[in-house]
Image (cartoon, rainbow, N blue to C red):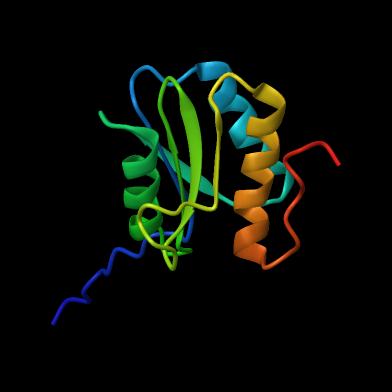
Amino acid sequence: MPAVQLEMTKPTVHVLCSPDAPSAAFKELLYGLEEEGIPWENDTKAGGALPLAWEAAQASRLGVGVGMDGQSIVLHFNKLDREQPLYRIPARSLGLARVLGANAARLVKKLPLKPLDGR
C-alpha cells in the first residue's frame, strides 16, 4: 500500500490585502513581522480591512491575521469578537504599519506589544 502524503500547512500569520492597499505600508508590515522572526503568507482579495483581518485570523493556524485596504490596516486575533479587532491604524502610516507587523508577531510569541502611540 503506498504511503499517503498529507499536506501540512506551515503555521503563519495571514495577511489579506484588498487591491487598493498601499504597497509601501504592506512592505513595512512585513518588515515588522520579519524582524520578530514570524513567518507570514499573503493574498489579495476584495473587501474591507476589518472583514479581511477576521478572515485571515480564522484561517491562520496561529490565530493571527491582518487585513489591509486603501484606508486602514487591521490586526485581528481569532479569539476576539469579529467587530472588535486588536488594532486599526491608517493605511498610509508607514511607521505604524511596521509596529503593527511586529505586534502581530509578538501576539504569536506571547510577548508584550509595542505601543502604537510612539511611547
Identify which residue is drawn at 38% across, 41% down.
50
Identify which residue is drawn at 25% across, 69% down.
5
- Depth check, front residue: 88 or 67: 88
- For this orientation, the residue located farthest to the left is 1
The x and y percentages for residue 86 are 54, 53
Decide: is 119 above or below 4.
Answer: above
Instruction: Please give left or right for residue 49 compared with residue 110 in the image.
Output: left
The x and y percentages for residue 2 are 17, 76
The x and y percentages for residue 30 are 60, 35
| Number of disc labels | 0
- Depth check, front residue: 82 or 97: 82
Decide: is 98 above or below 92.
Answer: below
Q: Say which quarter of the image contains residue 68.
A: top left
Q: Say which quarter of the image contains residue 49.
A: top left
- For this orientation, the residue located farthest to the bottom is 1
Identify which residue is drawn at 34% across, 26% down.
18
Identify which residue is drawn at 40% across, 26% down.
69
Q: Which quadrant, please, contains the C terminus?
A: top right
Instruction: Please give left or right for residue 87 compared with residue 41 in the image.
Output: right
Q: Say which quarter of the image contains residue 1.
A: bottom left
